[in-house]
Image: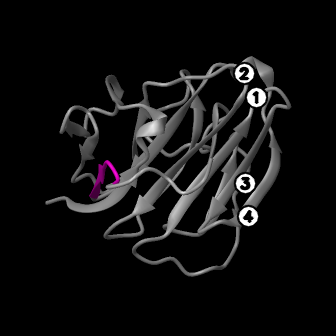
């Protein structure tokens, strides 16, 4: 069975029932995603952007099997953001940043329940920054304009996504 482990910030929008891996089940007004899959499976949020600045968070609430990041509508849903050339993201499971299908860069930090992944996007400057507990894991990663618009994307394995109890602390 699935165990609760991730929280997605509603600023990212709700999760798209027609833009998720088949092994993900949505509930709670499309704010909660659950999977029992032992493989990475993804779901994109509804809010996409092509310009401006944007920030959202995902919180580990019961496990470490979570990636959060951004992806175009062409990114595969059978993996995590950054595993292919259409996304980028940070994964708590291995403390790793993946960008646009390139090799991962591993930070070596430990992860725990309650860890927060922050995703900051500046689409006017075409940059992406990723944070774990407000500590930078990637600053000013490059976003190519051909990937726009982009969506928040979360990937999970053996767990679920739920909405947070309160809005994020960052703006």
Q: CA distance from mark 3 to mark 4?
A: 19 Å
Q: Measure the alpha-carbon separation of dots 1 and 4.
A: 18 Å
Name the residue located 62 percent from the left edge and 22 percent from the top edge: 49
The mark nearer the N terminus, 1 or 4, is: 1
Badge 1 marks a residue whose secondary structure is loop
Give the overall secondary structure of the magenta segment.
strand
- Please give the label number shown on residue 136: 4
Q: Is residue 18 left or right of residue 169?
A: left
The image's mark for residue 103 is 3
Of mark 3 and mark 4, the one earlier in the sequence is 3
Place residue 23 in its image quadrant: top left
User: Residue 123's mark?
Assistant: 1
- Label 3 vs 1, first from the N-terminus: 3
CA separation in Å, label 3 and label 1: 23 Å
State if disc 4 and disc 3 touch (CB < 8 Å).
no
Residue at horizontal 21%, vertical 53%? Answer: 36
Q: Residues within 10 Å of mark 3 (few under 14, many from 20)?
A: few
Front residue of 118/89: it is 118
> Is 121 left or right of 91, judged from the image as shown?
right
Residue placed under numbered mark 2 in the picture: 51
Q: Is residue 96 magenta?
A: no
Q: Percent from the top left, x then y, of residue 148?
A: 68, 20
Give the Cα distance between marks 2 and 4. Answer: 22 Å
What segment carries the magenta color? Answer: 159-164
Label 3 residue SS: loop
Q: For the residues labelled 2 and 3, say whether their Cβ atoms are less than 8 Å apart.
A: no
Number of labels in the image equals: 4
Query: Per the image, is 160 magenta?
Result: yes
Say whether marks 2 and 4 touch (CB < 8 Å). Answer: no
């Amino acid at each position: 069975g699935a165990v609760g482990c991730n929280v997605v910030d509603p600023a990212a929008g709700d999760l798209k029932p027609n833009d998720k891996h088949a092994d993900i089940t949505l509930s709670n007004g499309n704010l909660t995603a659950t999977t029992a899959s032992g493989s990475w499976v993804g779901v994109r949020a509804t809010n996409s952007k092509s310009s401006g600045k944007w920030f959202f968070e995902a919180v580990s609430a019961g496990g470490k099997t979570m990636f959060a990041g951004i992806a175009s509508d062409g990114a595969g849903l059978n993996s995590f953001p950054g595993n292919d050339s259409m996304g980028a993201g940070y994964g708590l499971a291995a403390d790793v940043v993946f960008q646009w299908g390139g090799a991962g860069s591993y930070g070596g930090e430990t992860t725990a329940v309650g860890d927060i992944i922050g995703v900051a996007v500046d689409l006017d400057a075409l940059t992406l920054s990723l944070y774990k507990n407000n500590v930078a894991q990637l600053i000013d990663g490059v976003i190519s304009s051909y990937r726009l618009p982009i969506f928040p994307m979360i990937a999970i394995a053996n767990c679920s996504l739920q909405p947070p109890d309160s809005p994020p602390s960052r703006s």
